[in-house]
Amino acid sequence: MESILILTHADESGATLTKASLEAITAGRELSARLGAPLAIGVIALDAAAAAAPFASIGARILAAAGEAFTQPRYATDVAACETLCRAAQPTLVLAPNSSRFARIMAGVTHRLGGVIDTHIAALAGSDTIEASRSFYRQRIESVITRAARPWFLLLDPGAHTAYAGEVGDASVEDISVDLPTLRTTVTGVRISGQSGAGGTIRPDASLLFVAGAGWTKKQPDGQIHTQQAADLILGFLRASGASLGSSKSLVDQGGDGNSVLPFLTHMNQVGQTGATPRHPKGLSTCCHGEEPHVVGWRFIAERRAISLDPNCGWTRGKADVVYIADAFQVVAKLNELLTART
Ligand SMILES: Cc1cc2nc3c(=O)[nH]c(=O)nc-3n(C[C@H](O)[C@H](O)[C@H](O)COP(=O)(O)OP(=O)(O)OC[C@H]3O[C@@H](n4cnc5c(N)ncnc54)[C@H](O)[C@@H]3O)c2cc1C
């Protein structure tokens, strides 16, 4: 008989689980109900009781590796915590979010447990067997994986399940003591690559993806380039809306061509065939033509809107739900005005 352990971790506050962790709880609950398998939840947090409060009434065994050592993502402490939680719960199936924190340690945890692992899982189906789906080659090929080997670790892609939202209560948490190795790594802070001064612009949990295209740095109707104004408008919008920033390839490539560039953009922001395939409920494209190699990265964006000067752009040819044929400089300036007035 299968038994399930969901491994979760808190965010920077140390007392609240990440959204991706809550999504893993939804997936684990569904799987547990379908298989009739007992469910345990492992929590890595500073304050595990607070982190577990939102699923206090779920009826699962809750185990925690809690305390100061687990406030920061660090290989040695995270891998020891997950290994200890797994040994305590003895699961056959381990579900965990495919967060950067867990993605870098879970192969090591699996090895220590003598298990097998699959990553980037988007769905779990099957009635008697477990069928885990993931995509390859930029979401062009979907594969369905079944395995006989146990324990089987499954890292779930963020955004593929709804975040669990239960009644907050007093959770009964088993504190599991973790034997830590000598720690050689001290986490002194987080530096976000290429985005100094502007703060982080890639926010996987944001409800809106804001995409900037190459049009922002092209000559505008007055014959001039307005890169600084474009940067101010885009950053102003991100600040006011909390949106995540994506980009077309043309815009992020421009740095290499010696052209006028937006300094806070890196290839990490690129969406598309050779970029990322983010999952956000909504997307707003600006100054971007909407060509197929870009739009293929919008596969999981549920509601798509675009602002382009070109009435014949790719977005208007069936790739967006709503297209505003308008000047994005003007539209975003107005949006920022409205958003700022609201706060
Ligand atoms: C193998 C391969 C892989 C690729 N992978 C990717 C990928 O992963 N991601 C990706 O993005 N691309 C990718 N591309 C490139 C892609 O085909 C396009 O060239 C690119 O997406 C175009 O970027 P863009 O729309 O920002 O720029 P442009 O095509 O230059 O379009 C700029 C748009 O801005 C509009 N505009 C200008 N000023 C304004 C204004 N004031 N207001 C409103 N609109 C304005 C213009 O009308 C125009 O439509 C790939 C190409 C190949 C061949």
Image: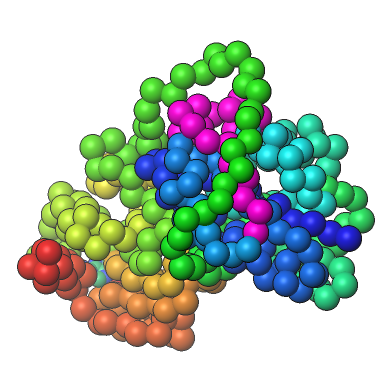
Percent across and percent down for residue 193 are 39, 36
Please say whether residue 77 is visible from this viewpoint: yes
* Residue 105 visible to an observer of this rendering: no
User: Which residue appears at 51% of the width and 18% of the height?
Assistant: 185
Q: Quadrant of the N terminus?
A: bottom right
Q: Is residue 181 left or right of residue 215?
A: right
Q: Nearer the viewer, residue 28 or 37?
A: 37
- Residue pictured at 83% horizontal, 42% vertical: 115
Residue 78 locus on image (x, y percent): 59, 33
**Ligand 1 location (quadrant):** bottom left
Q: Considering depth in this image, is 30 or 88 the residue closer to the camera?
A: 88
Residue 68 in magenta stretch: yes
Q: Position of residue 207 (x, y in %)?
A: 38, 67
The magenta region covers 60-80
Which color scheme did the rendering employ for the protein? rainbow
- Counting every numbered tag in the picture gives 0
x 55%, y 64%: residue? 57
| Nearer the observer, 180 or 313 | 180
In the rendered view, does 22 fall on the left or right side of 223?
A: right
Quarter of the figure with the C terminus:
bottom left
User: Does 323 lie within the magenta span?
Assistant: no
Q: Give residue 229's position: percent from left, percent from top.
A: 13, 54
As drawn, which residue projects farthest toward the right? Answer: 148
Say if 88 sits above or below 320 in the image: above
Position of residue 4 relative to residue 282, above or below, is: above
Instruction: Tell me the residue at 65%/66% (across/down).
Output: 29
**Quarter of image, res 209:** bottom left
Q: Quadrant of residue 191?
A: top left
Q: Nearer the viewer, residue 248 or 31?
A: 31
